[in-house]
Amino acid sequence: MENINYLNILKDSFTLVVLICCSLLSFTVAFERWWYFRKARHRKVDDFLAHISGLLKEDKADKAVEYTGKIDSPVARLFNYALRHREMPKHDIEELLATKRQEEKLNLEKFLGVLGTMGNIAPFIGLFGTVIGIIKAFRDLALSGVGGPTVVARGIAEALVATAAGLAVAIPAVIIFNYFTRKVKVIMSELEIFSSRLMIIMGSKH
């Protein structure tokens, strides 16, 4: 059997072109999310909280607001939001922090649906391409009248490339989606923990 010409398969298969686009989209989203999460993780949060606590004990709440406003992370934004509403009753601040955490969660989950969708639909796109390829293989056999199994085997081998391509797109997308989903859960847990600690620090004023 002749070697499979993947360039010709790509030219003849619309599904492979679609899968390549899906792959590019998946890795673009993965890189964008990696960069966002890289900035989202606030290292040395305990030191950060201790510094805020020190400023509040010194009645320098405005300095604390200014300090948190300069840091681009979910924890810092949460603290800044709470400090800017520090004069409100404690219960109201807790409610506001809950809504702010949900807002941060939406930002963290942004575009993750794309990865989940690619992981789900890519195998089906590949399977669709395989079915179309097999139909063409048997059509070519019927038209040629000669070649027997050799013609069919070559056509099926080329058709199965679509299934392999679909899996090649889906597997990384699912792995990356699960990885970032886990990161979201970790960051959200941290936000809840440090929200409670901040409320305890601010509690003496309410």
Image (tube, rainbow, N blue to C red):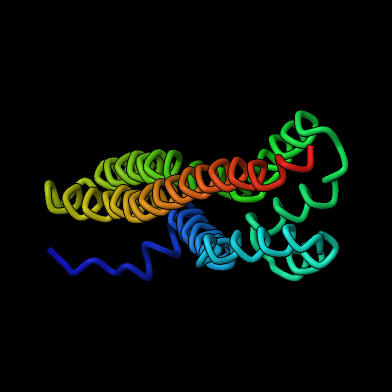
| Vertical arrangement, residue 129 with respect to residue 94, above or below | below
Q: Which quarter of the rendered picture does the N terminus lie within?
A: bottom left
Quadrant containing the C terminus is top right
Q: In this rendering, is residue 113 above or below 69? A: above
Q: Nearer the viewer, residue 20 or 143?
A: 20
Residue sitting nearer the eye, 201 or 42: 201
Looking at the image, which residue is at 56% across and 43% down? Answer: 113
- Residue displayed at 24% across by 45% down: 141
Residue 178 in view, yes or no: yes
Please give left or right for residue 44 compared with residue 158 in the image: right
- The residue depicted at 64 percent of the width and 66 percent of the height is 51
Residue drawn at point x = 45 percent, y = 40 percent = 121
Residue 24 visible within the image: no
Percent position of residue 22, x then y: 50, 55
Place of residue 180 in the rendered image (x, y in percent of width and height, measured from the top left) = 46, 51
Rendering quarter of residue 130: top left
- Residue 10 location in percent, x, y? 41, 63
Q: Position of residue 109 (x, y in %)?
A: 59, 46
Left/right placement of residue 186 relative to residue 54 reads left
- How many circles with numbers are drawn on the protein? 0
